Structure formats: structure tokens, C-alpha cells
Image (tube, rainbow, N blue to C red):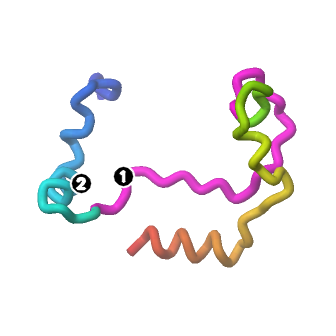
Amino acid sequence: MKDVYTKLKFLRFREQLDALENGKIAPPVHVRIKPMNPCDHDCWYCAYHDDNLQLGNLMEYKDRLPREKMLEIIEDLGE
């Protein structure tokens, strides 16, 4: 796939374009599920650890998505 970074990548998603044109909502092309917040990698580029951003201040590091809820989300995505 040579054109993976093309600016015209959106043209590959006809269902989403048709829905947009008709004022409807199409399912997402990509979904990222983050089941837990704890991370001890301390990456220098991480926005959650940047002192100049408030992003990390709002996050509860011990929060976790309950297994049942995660499975429910995955099931919903399959529909």
C-alpha cells in the first residue's frame, strides 16, 4: 500500500462519505479502547506527563475499565 499517508485516504471510506452526505452517522473506521490508565513508562513525549498541559491533571491513574464494560463495548462495535 504505497499511498498509506495520502491526503486522499478518506476517499477509501465510501460508507462514511455517503452517510455524511445524507446527514447520517456512520460507524467509526477505527476505535481505540484503553482499558486502564496506569503507565510507568514515563515517555518524554507523553502529553499526560507534560507539566505545561493540564491533560495529566484530569486523569485518574488508577482508573480501569471494568472487564464487563469492555466486553460490552467490543460487542457493540461488532454490530
The span shown in magenta is 26-47
Q: Is residue 76 left or right of residue 63?
A: left
Q: Is the magenta stretch mostly helix, strand or loop?
A: loop
Q: Is mark 2 on a helix, strand or loop?
A: helix
Name the residue tied to disc 1: 29
Q: Which amino acid does label 2 sit on?
A: Gln
Q: Which residue is drawn at 13% across and 61% down?
A: 22
Q: Which residue is drawn at 29% across and 23% down?
A: 2
Q: Where is residue 12 in the image (x, y as percent from the top left)?
A: 21, 42
Quick check: marks 1 and 2 in contact, CB under 8 Å? Answer: yes
Q: Where is residue 61 in the image (x, y as percent from the top left)?
A: 83, 51
Name the residue tied to disc 2: 16
Q: Which amino acid does label 1 sit on?
A: Val
Q: Which residue is drawn at 14% across and 56% down?
A: 18
How packed mark 1 is, by other alpha carbons closer than 10 Å (few <14, some 14-19, many 20 or more), is: few
Q: What element carries label 1?
A: loop
Q: Is residue 13 left or right of residue 71?
A: left
Q: In which quarter of the image is residue 64?
A: bottom right
Is the residue 35 above or below the residue 30 in the image?
Answer: below
In the rendered structure, find residue 66 and report the number of the disc placed on it.
none
